[in-house]
Amino acid sequence: MSLIDSHAHLDLPEFNHDLEAVIQRARDNGVDRIITVGIGISECRQALELAARYPFIFATLGIHPHNAVGFDTAALDFLEAHAANQKVVALGEMGLDYYRNLSPRDAQRRCFSSQLGLARRLKLPVVIHDREAHDETLEILRQEKAHEMGGVLHCFSGDADMAFACIDMGFYISIPGTITFKNARVIQDVVKSVPLQHLLIETDCPFLTPVPHRGKRNEPAHVRLVAEKIAEIQQVDFHEVARVTAENTCRVFRLEKVAG
């Protein structure tokens, strides 16, 4: 059995004091690989350092919509310069967040479109953040021809119709720990509707900790709980969920196939 946490933030301060123990717990729980995701220049630098240090950690580089107000050509140049690193598997996390609105919406849209354009030019998949901006996220993905590079709708929060619209563009749907929450009917319905062949699993750690650890810091070891919940909802074997989601992750991020 092999699990992949397709979206973590191991570069954040919450892991500064016990990163080695966190990584060991992940390995002990069958987590074969971890994708650590950049959300700003500083975090991207740290993601690159982690990927260089651990053979089973890979990095994505991007500017989160919360940081879009500071996005400029220098940031785009940074992403392009480091995207050639062999441990960089995608651009992102990028997108729109109309829930917190920590950057003006026009700045978010410019930042998102610019990164999609770079990804298309570099032929890299993308990791998409979409919170309460479903229609506009889809619109920009279509405008920027995102079907040409594909990628992941991370921490998916739309409904089944949106999921299939994304799948039609060549995207995978990534399921976080919220799937274990009692009131998570929408995402549970998505998992009932979408075939396993289109799903990834993630923690988004240190956020979105699944039950029974809700309220505590999340970490990659808990991605197992996401897989277990998907297995319960789809009424399939847990090992099948682990195998297929790992294969999907390898496919979208162009990783070598997981052994076994």
Image (cartoon, grey):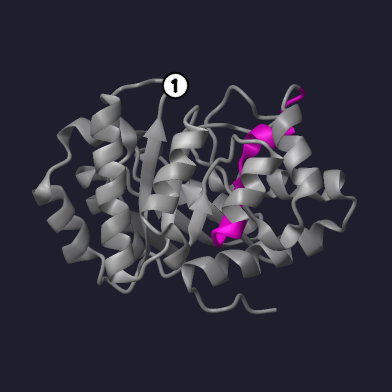
Image quadrant holding the N terminus, namely: bottom right
Q: Residue at x 24, y 50 (%)?
A: 114
Is-magenta flag for residue 67? no
Count of numbered circles in the view: 1
Question: Can the viewer see residue 10?
Answer: no
Q: Residue 227: x and y, percent? A: 72, 50
Q: Residue 60: x and y, percent? A: 36, 57
Residue 25 horizontal side relative to residue 82, left or right: right
- The magenta-colored residue range is 168-182
Query: Element type at marker 1?
Result: loop
Residue 94 horizontal side relative to residue 242, left or right: left
Q: Residue at x 26, y 24 (%)?
A: 104
Q: What is the residue that sits farthest to the right in this orientation?
A: 235
Q: Residue 189: x and y, percent? A: 78, 37
Q: What is the residue that sits farthest to the left in this orientation?
A: 74
Is-magenta flag for residue 178? yes
The residue where tag 1 is placed is: 99
Q: Quadrant of residue 96?
A: top left
Camera-side residue: 146 or 9?
146
Above/below status of 20 relative to 244? above
Above/below status of 3 relative to 258? above
Residue density around tag 1, few if under 14, some if 14–19, many if 20 or more, within 10 Å: few
Above/below status of 5 relative to 87? above
Camera-side residue: 237 or 189?
189
Q: Residue at x 58, y 40 (%)?
A: 156
Image quadrant holding the C terminus, namely: bottom right
Residue 245 horizontal side relative to residue 55, left or right: right
| Amino acid type indicated by mark 1 | Tyr
Q: Residue at x 60, y 58 (%)?
A: 168
Question: Can the viewer see residue 241?
Answer: yes
Q: Quadrant of residue 214?
A: top right
Q: Residue 155: x and y, percent? A: 55, 40
